[in-house]
Amino acid sequence: MLANQIGYYSLILGLLLSVLLCGVSIKDLNSSNKQINQNVLSLSFLQLVFVIVSFLSLILSFINSDFSNETVFNNSHTTKPLFYKISGTWGNHEGSLLLWLLVLTLFIFLFLIKSREQPKKYRILTLLFQQIIIIGFFLFVLMTSNPFNYLFPIPTEGLGLNPILQDPALAIHPPILYLGYVGTSIIFSSSLAAVTQNYVSKKWGKHIKKWVLVSWIFLTIGIMLGSIWAYYELGWGGFWFWDPVENVSLMPWLILTALLHCIIVLERRAALTSWVVILSITTFTLSMCGTFLVRSGILNSVHTFANDPARGIFILIFLFILIVLSLGIFFLFHKESNKNSSNFLWLSRETSILINNWFMMYFLSVVLIGTVYPIFLDVISSEKISVGPPFYHKLIVPFLIPFLFFMSLGPRLKWIKSKIENKNSLIITFIISIMLTFFIVQNLTNDLLFYTILVSSAFFLFFTTLKELFIKKINNISQTVAHFGFSLLILSILFNSILSSEIITNIKIGEKYTYNKSEIFFKNIKERKESNFNSIIAYFEIKDENGKTVELKPEIRIYNQPVIITSEADIKTTLLEDKFLVMNLVKGKEYFNIRYQVKPFMIWIWISVLLLSLGGLMSLFKKKYEK
Amino acid sequence: MKNKFSLFFVIIFLSFCFVVFYKGLNNSNTYAPTIKGKKKIPIFEAKDFNSSVYLNSKKIFEEDNFYILNIWASWCVPCRTEHPLLMRLSKNQSVKLIGLNYRDNLNNAKKFINELGNPYSQIIIDDNGTLSVEFGAYGVPETFIIDKNKIIIRKFIGPINNEIVEEIKLIIK
């Protein structure tokens, strides 16, 4: 009860502080002081404190199961384990927006502390732009999705947290994803500030690169956690489904990746400034756009919490205000950098990064069109379609071939003008890749030519980066690690999709099912009671083609609040392959429907994404710029 | 000149996007697919909601009448929003509403009906969700219109709204 009030009023105080901060910083903008007014820093800190207090009081209400709070009532239940009570705080629309605010205020505070060497006006303008976003979100939370709505009479029991959200990976997925997703707001604000100050320079590039890296690392890990969750919990036996919500997190990632590469050019050569600014603006705009698509209910997806048109309209208007504001600033203030630095020959590092950009733009447009086209079609012709994986695969996979190829060559080029060195070793690597691929692929697929080219381009990148890691002296290790991770990712995804096998059958207790040389034996079932669910655990013994047996124990959970039946897959992970078994109830109850999948190299997908983010992390912490 | 042109183009494009998204927001999420061919209702046996007696589908749909089959559950939030509309439909004499309680806890379902009223002339239970699949349902809520020949002539995926109620009234006239 008390926590409710405290939370609500700290939100209002936070909003008032935003307004105050704008006033103080505008005054400070015109003052002759060289350093930023100390009050601005203190106020920004105070604002952060208020948002933290508000967030903590929501957590407290969840822990105490205070059902006088509408959000708690809608999303929690007394029988939930403590861990899920806490994670329930951000597992809903209102709470997650509060988390959004927390990240916004946290990042601007950190920015102010970390940017002391930057020009004063630039810092203040960044703060101002960020405060515009913060005010927008404060208003959004307070007006349309207040997490502290009071309920009377106080219900004795809550409605419960959606069971599919009761999962450890999902408990930490939103905070980490948000750090990346909302972290892009700082890039947005500071690039706008830099444009107005005509400060898009080498120095700025060096300073903003850190923020791009931080967002990129968190976004990468956040997407991976979501993907792991989908693999384990949704029980569809895949890790990426091109669901709108996944797309919405992938789009900023693609842009952020392009931005990261552009910034390297900016920091070294002060070129590609327009690219950097436009990409910085787009990244955050796409994050906002994603929030709009997912939260307004305009698309149906796992993450759509509520269909409240008022919310949708608010974000939509706010989103377009931000777009118009940023484009206006870009057109008014931006001047293309001096001609000299944009002079580079076609065979140079710059060109290769530009090529990378165009590929990213292409991937982005495919994902964007696939995601929003159904909405446009529905509005214009009231026809309903859904865009599925085949669309994305057809349009993305073939373009991976030249992309991977350029990725192997690009980093070997020098700035401005270059020749390809060590041509012979490259050609040898390429031939080895093709031959290796041919031997691996020839018995596996019908589409021999296509897969040979695709897989060998992935191998080519794999070998060139691997060679760089071990043979050459360590000159740009972070980039090599990240690129190596990417080649490993593509290779594991490709082999995973080529080599996966699946058996679906109905089976009853004591029965044996044989397929080719593998054997599935359904031993027995046991029941188990937990505070928030009852479950049926089945024991299966599976003998694979090599005669090895494993025991798999898939589960069916019947959650009590709300009553939902979920299937928990059991997965045995080894370095080479995952064995995945999931079961469902069938009418009559004697039979169970099982789906058994062998998915090779699953763990390497996660490992390679971790390598990718490790590359980012190394780049963030390296001491001085490498030659 | 070039700059002005691109600015103009961007503004036009953005306004277009805004209008589409704005309209898209107001579109309902209900989806009424066209039904190809004549699909008769499946033959099945299901437990009665109140007495737990097994009922035959012929008995449930025995009258020479239009039927509306509504799939619902107490845990489904959109079902709550469409419930008042079902109550309104149930006052219509020329149609009978059958409720199909989908994967629900019986006590919660009873509480739901007590709280919000019972629009159904009969409720049957679909414990494991298989009956709904036989009807060709994708989820909850879903509403099927069944004509006098026991043929499904229309189905609505998602919660029904005022327009759909009017359409249903036209069909059953």
Image (tube, coloured by chain):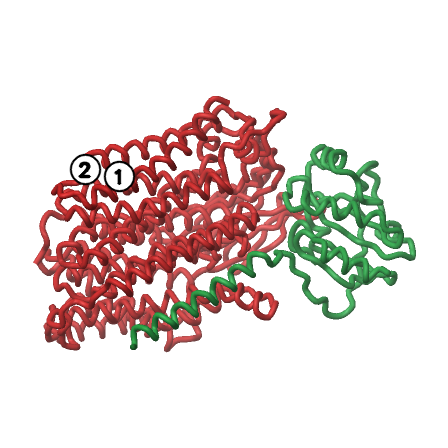
Q: Residue furthest right?
A: B64
The chain holding disc 2 is A
The image quadrant that residue A329 belongs to is bottom left
Which mark sits nearer the N-terminus, 2 or 1? 1
Left or right: A365 as drawn, with respect to A32: right
Q: Amino acid at mark 2?
A: Asn
Q: Which mark is residue A24?
A: 1
Q: Give me the C-alpha separation between circle 2 and circle 1.
A: 9 Å
**Residue A377, relative to residue A593: is it above or below?**
below
Query: What chain is colored red?
Result: A
Badge 1 marks a residue whose secondary structure is helix
- The picture places residue A404, in percent across and down from the top left corner, at 28, 68
The chain holding disc 1 is A
Q: Amino acid at mark 1?
A: Val
- The picture places residue B160, in percent across and down from the top left corner, at 70, 53
Binning the other alpha carbons within 10 Å of mark 1 as few (below 14), some (14 to 19) or many (20 upward) gives: some
Of A12 and A602, nearer the camera is A12
Query: What chain is colored green?
Result: B
Read off the residue under disc 2: A37
Count how many numbered circles sit on residues in the image.
2
**Residue B72, relative to residue B135: is it above or below?**
above
Q: Residue at x 40, y 60 (%)?
A: A496
Left or right: A185 as drawn, with respect to A202: right
**Residue B156, relative to residue A76: is it above or below?**
below
